[in-house]
Image (cartoon, grey):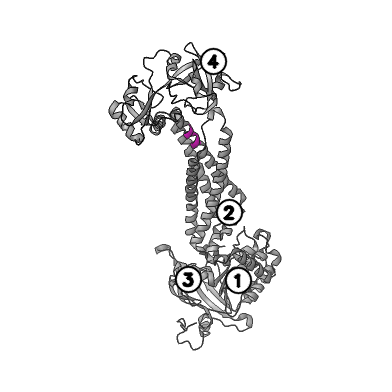
Amino acid sequence: MATDGIAVFSRDVTKVFGRGDTQVHALRGIDVNIRLGELTMLVGPSGSGKTTLLSVITGLLDATSGDLVVLDRRPGELSQEELILFRRENLGFVFQQFNLIPALTAAENVAVPLLAGGVKRRQAVARGEEFLASLGMAHRAHALPSELSGGEQQRVALARALVHEPKLIVCDEPTSALDGRTGHAVMELLSSTAVRPDRAVIIVTHDARIFDFADQIAHMDDGRITSLEQNRKNGAEVDGFAAALAALPVGEPDARSYPTTGD
Amino acid sequence: MNFVALKMLVADRAKYFSLIFAIAFASFLLANQVSIFIGIMTRPASQIRDVVDADIWVMDPQTLYSDEVYALRDYDLYRVRSVPGVEWAVPLYKGTGRAKGPDGRFRTVILMGVDDATLVGAPRKMLVGSIYDLDQPDAAIIDKAGFLYFFPGEPLQAGKTLQMNERRVLIVGISDASAPFQSFPVLHTRYSQALGFVGRERNLLSFVLAKPAAGVSVGKACERIEAVTGLRARSTAEFSLDAFLFYLRNTGIPVNFGITVMIALIVGTVIPGQTFYIFTAENLKQFGALKAIGVTNRRIVGMILLQALVVGGTGYALGMGISAAFFARTLNYLPTRGIIFPWQVMASIGVVVLLVVGLASLISIRRVLVLEPAVVFRG
């Protein structure tokens, strides 16, 4: 259980690619809290650092500096093996291009995280079928990705992200390859099945049509979070980073330090 | 994850089958060429290997191999017999002559003159007749290929005659002698008879065949013979190897076959390597997704190796099957008799295929290992 309901705690996180004259500052001091039970969207123009931030949060890239805590663990302090295990157990991914394995059926694709965790094939695929059924996709469980529509593929990808009960779901442009109606349907499914009190969801998106689904929206530009909107969908909008800091857990002596209370 | 790897492999049928075909083709080419090479290169020793009774061959000290012989003097036979540790020693004539058939067709033949008393050196595999029929006047045993050359289309039977050196040669038996390098017919006759068939030669003693006494090793007996007589003594295996090495060093055969084997190796490595690499490159996004999801590098390497092993194993099995069918088909074909598909070649090619697919998969493995899983977030 993450401390005080915070899934991702980021303070002054930077990411620099390259060296010398070719240096690129992709992230320039990211301060953000992503809480369990919430759906957070990272939005902003291309090149603003959204995907880099997502990669750093998921441990796919190392942060250059700063303090980053994800589900009570600091990815920078984990070995490669620990990081892989951490991702496998705690994270679920939904990709822009779905990244389903074309040779596998929908149910088999859903079973991949379970297989990676050592579950036997038969059990894993059966669980994948059950999960697809819970998303209303039972009739497509044995179809190949090439036989599925874009919306169906994204639903399979969502099932794959959820099947192993992760604590953090990260979605990269989940609706950008879909038409408006399908994208909306996928987001409804995502917000109804993925968002739970013990789980956080982060979505990187350009798609303004789905902003209403967010509990928190972090606007990014030039490697910075320029504004943070809270609870927009509940009508309790809070603008700006200072306000976001103020929303940190009550009783915390230093809001810029990660709470260290035990699980 | 193994079934994921296998499903990924067979999903792209065109690449899957081209991988298998390339490996099968290379395996077949290697098996075929190496086996034929070995078959041809062991032919110079055919007449040595066919002598199963004696373990030691004694010859002129300057003898290079079995086809070029400088005759010994008759008393050398007795000198060998007198060497301590030699159980027995018998004479053997090996030379060439010309034989003419009843219809006028003639060929150079290999003439083996075996000891009159013991028939040591006579063929053991007889198709018609018996070696003891050599007791008859002018008798000779001819090999099957020779018989069919002189008497094409006729059933194998004794009683036919040839001419050698204006002398009648009575065919009393037909042997299954191993094919000689030059594919000449092989005639066996008695030592005393051989002189009549080949004309005047001052000395007829090509070799002395000997057997070590009980408790004396072949090597030790050879050493003693050489020390006592000053002649060269070789075991059957050593003398066979001499013939093999002579042809290896003095003919273009190894170069010819070597080039084909190299082509097979290059085709067998480059095509599967390239195809396998393209296959991996096309699945890079999927591998990236697997890495992001939490599949370890070790597991992914295992998946790629499994894919490589499956295509390698299938291609190898197919190649060996085609090779086996080829050699089964040519087994009873006279010109290629004796050229078989040794299990050692099959095993060696298995090792080569393992190396080839290992090498091919290494490039792919490297590509996947250096892949940043963050690539999955790039549209």
Image: magenta residue range? B33-39
Marks 1, 4: nearer the viewer: 4
Query: In this figure, which residue is indicated by the disc labeled 3?
Result: A27
B86 relative position to B143: left or right: left
Marks 3, 2: nearer the viewer: 2
- Asked if one can make out residue A98 in the rendered structure from this viewpoint, the answer is no
Query: In this figure, which residue is indicated by the disc labeled 2?
Result: B9
Q: Say whether marks 4 and 2 touch (CB < 8 Å).
A: no
Q: Residue B15, how many percent across, how many down?
A: 58, 49
Query: In this figure, which residue is indicated by the disc labeled 1?
Result: A162
| Three-letter code for the amino acid on which mark 2 is drawn | Leu
Inter-mark Cα distance, 4 to 2: 66 Å
Answer few, some or many: residues within 10 Å of disc 3's Cα (few below 14, many 20 plus, some between 14 and 19): many
Marks 3, 4: nearer the viewer: 4
Inter-mark Cα distance, 1 to 4: 91 Å
Q: Residue B319, how many percent across, how many down?
A: 55, 42
